[in-house]
Image (cartoon, rainbow, N blue to C red):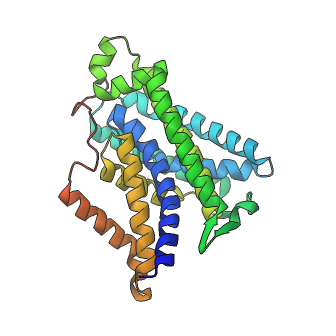
């Protein structure tokens, strides 16, 4: 084995896994409280992409801030308009609602911006890389890993040190009991969607910085990756979402580096086959959250 190629692949896998972890975390926060796999989460990344198109030209910090604010507002509106009226319905209704919101937002984006992908370049400096010995470390990769670490620490502090964060943890453990103790359902669920929007906004920024294009369907593959990483890590566990995203990122980059050229096209299929193998060995996921099974928002 070429040790230089292996180490470079691990560096690339850390960056990709960090991006996957951000996407999975946004989905895991909502699932932990509502037991809802929000398949419209990918459209929050799409909203981040089009927000970047609208605000391109602004200073980088302002651009990121405006993008994140747009996505957080969109996530809170999504909860208020689409999910709050059906919150007490069966899980199937919530799932269908998430698909309906996803398709509506995709078609709305097509009506406003068109169906063709839009190219965008707002961070040309991030395309550069540093050489450390035989390693090439991209500035974009450093930003991805660094932003993920900052958000993870911030989320941990938020959940453990703030009043709303403690209420969200209590709701994830047992929502009916938390409500009996005075936790307000609307506030906690809206807070979960706002946190989900924050992670989606940052992930959308990094995804566009990586691909350089924005399209109405850009969230489809992202939400699939986030869902797989969440299931692999353990549904409802933020730590599991991070670990699942990292594992999926490393598997993907290792397959990309070492698969023969004639089978490289099947990289994603083989990666998901590996995930299935892990789930066969550990069907509950890598981390089992301490939540009450079947707990629902009433």
Residue, x 45% and y 69% (percent of image)?
Answer: 253
Task: Pick the quarter of the image with the N terminus.
Answer: bottom left
Q: Is residue 103 above or below residue 88?
A: below
Total numbered badges shown on the rendered structure: 0
Left/right of residue 49 with respect to residue 97 in the rendered view:
right
Q: Residue at x 53, y 42 (%)?
A: 199
Which quadrant holds residue 250?
Answer: bottom left
Which residue ends up furthest to the bottom in the rendered image?
A: 262
Q: Report whether 295 appears left or right of 20.
A: left
Which residue is nearer to you in this view: 3 or 274?
Answer: 3
List x then y, in percent, for residue 4: 51, 77
Q: Is residue 123 left or right of residue 223?
A: right
Q: Residue at x 52, y 49 (%)?
A: 43
Observer-nearest residue: 39 or 108? 39
Expressed as whole percent of the image width and height from the top left, the position of residue 51 reads 67, 47
Residue 203 pos. (x, y %): 55, 50
Q: Hey, which residue is sitting farthest front in the picture?
A: 133
Task: Give the quarter of the image for residue 74.
Answer: top right
Question: From where the camera sits, is residue 79 visible?
Answer: no
On-image quarter of the C terminus: top left
Q: Position of residue 100 (x, y in %)?
A: 43, 46
Residue 15 in sight? yes
Residue appearing at x 59%, y 49% in the figure: 146
Q: Nearer the viewer, residue 7 or 83?
A: 7
């Amino acid at each position: 084995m070429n040790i230089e190629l292996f180490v470079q692949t691990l560096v690339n896998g850390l960056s990709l896994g960090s991006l996957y972890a951000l996407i999975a975390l946004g989905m895991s926060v909502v699932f932990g409280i509502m037991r809802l796999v929000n398949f419209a989460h990918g459209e929050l990344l799409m909203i981040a992409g089009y927000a970047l198109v609208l605000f391109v030209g602004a200073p980088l910090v302002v651009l990121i801030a405006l993008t994140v604010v747009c996505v957080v507002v969109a996530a809170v509106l999504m909860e208020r308009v689409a999910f709050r009226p059906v919150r007490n319905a069966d899980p199937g209704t919530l799932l269908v609602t998430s698909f309906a919101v996803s398709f509506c937002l995709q078609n709305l984006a097509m009506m406003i911006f068109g169906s063709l992908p839009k190219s965008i370049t707002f961070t040309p400096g991030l395309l550069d890389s540093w050489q450390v010995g035989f390693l090439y470390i991209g500035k974009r990769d450093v930003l991805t890993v660094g932003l993920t670490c900052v958000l993870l620490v911030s989320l941990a502090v938020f959940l453990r040190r703030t009043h709303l964060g403690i209420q969200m943890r209590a709701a994830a453990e047992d929502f009916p009991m938390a409500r009996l103790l005075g936790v307000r359902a609307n506030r906690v669920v809206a807070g979960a969607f706002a946190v989900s929007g924050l992670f989606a906004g940052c992930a959308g920024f990094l995804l566009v910085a990586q691909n350089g294009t924005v399209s109405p369907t850009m969230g489809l593959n992202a939400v699939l990756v986030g869902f797989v990483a969440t299931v692999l890590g353990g549904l409802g566990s933020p730590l599991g979402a991070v670990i699942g995203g990292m594992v999926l990122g490393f598997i993907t980059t290792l397959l990309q580096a070492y698969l023969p050229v004639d089978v490289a096209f099947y990289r994603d299929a083989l990666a998901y086959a590996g995930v299935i193998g892990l789930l066969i060995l550990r069907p509950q996921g890598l981390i089992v959250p301490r939540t009450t099974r079947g707990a629902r928002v009433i």
